[in-house]
Amino acid sequence: MKEFLIQRYRPDPTGPVIRPTLLRVDDDGRIIQADRHAETMFGYDTSDLTGQKVQHILASRQDDPFAPAHRHRLDNGQTVLVTFRHKDGFFFTALLGLRMEIRDSDQAATASITLKDSDAMDSRIQRLAEQNAGFGLWELDMPSNEISWSEGMYRLLELKAGSELTPEQALFYCQTGQNRVRAMFRRCMRTGQPFSMDLTILTSRQRPQRVTLAGRALKNGGRVQKLGGVMVNHSEAMVHDLEKQQAQQILQATTAASSDLVVAIDTEFRLLHFNTPWCQQFQHAFDLTPKTGDNLRSLLKDFPNERRLIERLWQRAFDREHFVAEMPLNRQGEGLPIYEFHFQSIRGDRGEVTGAVHVARDISNRIQHTSNSDYRMRHDPVTGLMNRRSFIEHLERAMGHRHKRQSTDGLLFLDLDNFEQFNEDAGSGTCDRYLRELAGMLGLRVRQRDALARLSGDTFALFIENCPEPRARKIAEEIREQIAQFQFEWQGRQLQTTASGGLLILGTDAPLQPEQLLTQAADLCHTAKTSGRNRIHTTQALPVELANRGTDRQLEQLHQALDNGQLILEFQSLKPVASVTWGDHIEILCRIPGTGDDSPLLPEQFLPVAERFDLAKRLDRQVIRQTLQWLSQHRLLEPRLKYCGFNLSLATILDDTFADFMEQQVRQTPFQAHCFCLEIRESHATQYPDEVAVLCDALHRAGCRVALEGAGASVESYSLAANLPVDIIKLDRRIMNDLERDPVQQIMVDALHRIAETAGKETVATFIENDETLRKVRTLGIHFGQGYRLSRPRPLDELKPAEVELSTGRIGG
C-alpha cells in the first residue's frame, strides 16, 4: 500500500481553494482510500474513487506513479509532476509525493491488551512516565515515620536523586501552605480521607513551579499503615493560562483603545470577540445588540440582502488570507458612514482556517472630502465603481504597458437584460440599491488586479489583465452566471435579471485606443443581445483598418446567409499520391453570397467579421448542417465518400457542446460517422492542448475522425503529431513552399511523416501547386495530396453522381 500526497501545481489564485489530498493505493494500483479533499481535487465523491484503478484519474500511462521512472524518484523522497483528468473532462497538473509505503504482503502482527499489576511493571517504565509527564510518587511509612520518594519527586524539586532530606526540609520548598500540608497529612492519617491541593513551590534553583499534591491512606488489616500519593507539575499549563490571560487582556485593551470596528468570528459565523465601537455601530445599523457567541447569520435573518453580502465577505476571508473592501455596514440606510474593511483569516497551528477578523475604519470624511473633486470625477456615485472616464484612463495605461505582460488581456462589456422593466416596476431608487448590491457582489468576485467600472445606466465593463483566453472566457461566463443568480428582495418580491456581454481578447494586433476597444466590445455585446440575451460572445480585437473596412455590410451579408441557410458550399479533393485508394476524399469550403452585383465574400473577408461578432461557432455548425443535408439527398455517394473534412474555428474548439451536436447530425444521415473528419489548426492545439485533447476524445466517441491542420508551423508540431489523439496530419503551407528545392524542409516533412506513420496516422501534403512538388511528395511517401495541381475547388453540386438511364429507370443525378 502506498499513501500519496497530491497538491495542485500553480493553482488558480482567483479560483476556489483546493487543498492537498491524500490517496491510498494498493499494490495492484487500486484506490483503497481517499480523504475528504478528493472531491474538490478530482470532482469524484470519495465513495466513487474507492475501488477504482488509479489510471482512472490519470491523463495517460506516462503519469502512472508506479512507472519505473516515477517510482525511483518517489522512493528517494522526491516529488513528481503528474497530469490528472478531472471528472468534468479537463486536465490539470499536480505535484505527487510518497507519504508512506507498506507492502500488502506484510501482515500486521496479532496482539492483545491485558491488565497487569503495577508492581510487576518494569521500573524503567515508571521512570519514563515520571520524566515525560512531570510527576513524582511519595510514600510515608507511619510506624517508622520515614518518607520515600521516587526519582520524579527529586526531579520536580531539581535535586539530585537520593539527596538527604528531612520532611521539615521538604516543607521548606513550599512557599505557601506549609501548615495546610501538615493538616492534610494529619487528617488523612486519622480519618483515612484522601486529599488533593494546589501549591506553589520554589525549587532548589529558585524557580517557582505550580504543582498538585495528592495523597490517600494505605490500610493493612483495617488500620492505616502508610500514606502514598503523587505530586504533579502544572507549571506549563499555568504559564499557558497566564499567557492566554495576558493575550486576552492585551486584545481587549488594544481593541478598546481603537475607534476602528474590530470583530472576529469562527468558521460557523459565531462571534468570538468584538470591541465597543463595532457593537455600537451594529446596534445603530441593525437595531440589534450582539453578544459573544451569537451567530451572525441568525442575527441578520431579517436583513437578507445584508446577510448574503456579509456571508460572502467572511467566506472570502476564510478562502483568502487577506483582502480589503469599502462599503457601509448597512446598505439600506442613507447617510450611514463608509468603512474600509481589512479582512484577515485566522489560522491554527497546522495552518487550518479557524476563523477570521476584520478591522474597519470610517473613511466617510476622506470620501466626502475628495468627492467634491477627484473622487467624484473618477467614481460612479451610485455603485462606487470606476466611471467611464476613470476606466478609459486605466485602459489607456494598461494598453501602454501590455508588452511587459506574459499573457493576453481581455475586455468584457456587460449590458443588463430588460433593466428598463425594473425602473417601471420598482422605481429609480430601488434600481440604484439593486445596482449597489450587484456592484458589491461583482467587486468581490473579480480578481484584485482587474478593473471593474460602471459605464452608464445598466452597462458595466471589466478589464481582465494578463489572463489566457480560456481563463478569460471562464471568468466572463462566471460573471454572467453570478448576475443571473443574483437576487434582490423588494417588497416581498425577488428582483432578478440576466446580462449579455461581449468579451474582446486583446492580442498583439489590438488597437491601443480605449474608445475603439470599447466600441468593438459594445458591438459584440449587441450581437449577444440580438442572438437571444443571457450569453457572452467572444472574439479577438481587430486592428483599426480591419474593424472599419465595410464591416456593417459584410456582417449583414453573413447574417442573411446564416439566417436563410444560403451558404455557398464548395469542395476540394484530396488525392492519394503514394498508392491507389478508391473513393472520394474531399474538404468542404465555404463562401458567402454577395448582394446585388457584389461578388461572394471569400473566407479572408468574412472570417474576421464572424470571429469579431462571435458568429464563427454558428458558421461552423451551419456549414456542417448544410453539407450533411445535401449528402442525405444523394445517398448514392455513401459507398464512394471516404473522407469529408470540415475546418473548425477556435470558438467551436472551446465549445463543450460541439461533440454532441456533431454526433446528433451524423446520426441523421445514411453515411458512416468514420468518413467525417474535423480539422483543428495546429496553432489552436498548441495554445489549448487540454481542450483539444478533450474534444478529440469526444469526437472519437461519436465515431468521427480528427485531423491536425498546419503541422510543421512550429517546433511543437512533432510532439503534437506523436501524442495528440488525431488520425490525420495535414502539413502546413509554409513547410510545403519550395519543398522540391529546400533540403531542410524535406527533412522536416520526412520527420513528420515518419512520426505520423509510427503513431498510426495518415499524412496529407497541402498546397501542391506544380509537378516538382508532387514528385517530391511521392518520393517522401506522403499518403495524400491537396492543391491546385491535383484539384481546384468546385461547387458541391458537381460531386453528385452522374445520371444514368437504365431499363429499370434513371439513377444518379
Image (spheres, grey):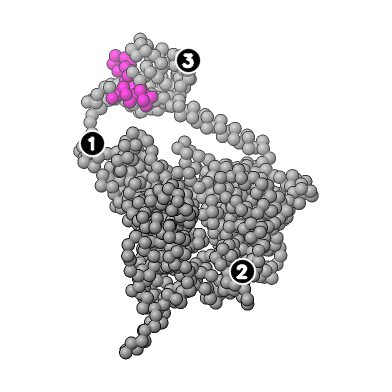
- Quadrant (top left, top right, bottom left, bottom right) of the C terminus: bottom left
In the image, what residue occupies the spot 44% across and 13% down? 204
For disc 2, the marked residue is 555
How far apart are the two marked residues, 2 and 3, measured between alpha carbons? 93 Å
In the image, what residue occupies the spot 70% across and 60% down? 456
In the image, what residue occupies the spot 48% across and 69% down? 793
Q: Amino acid at mark 2?
A: Leu
In the image, 18: left or right of 130? right
In the image, 391: left or right of 504? right
Q: Secondary structure at mark 2?
A: helix
The percent coordinates of residue 174 (x first, y second) are 45, 18
Depth check, front residue: 535 or 760 = 760
Q: Earlier in the sequence, mark 3 or mark 1?
A: 1
In the image, 354: left or right of 612? left
Residue 148 inside the magenta-drawn segment: yes
Compared with residue 344, is residue 191 higher up or lower down, i.e. above or below?
A: above
For disc 3, the marked residue is 206
For disc 1, the marked residue is 113
View extreme (top): residue: 164
The percent coordinates of residue 479 (x first, y second) are 57, 58
The percent coordinates of residue 526 (x first, y second) are 63, 66
How far apart are the two marked residues, 3 and 1, measured between alpha carbons? 44 Å
In the image, what residue occupies the spot 68% across and 50% down? 396
Q: Quadrant of residue 413?
A: bottom right
Q: Which residues are magenta?
A: 125-150
Depth check, front residue: 232 or 573 = 573
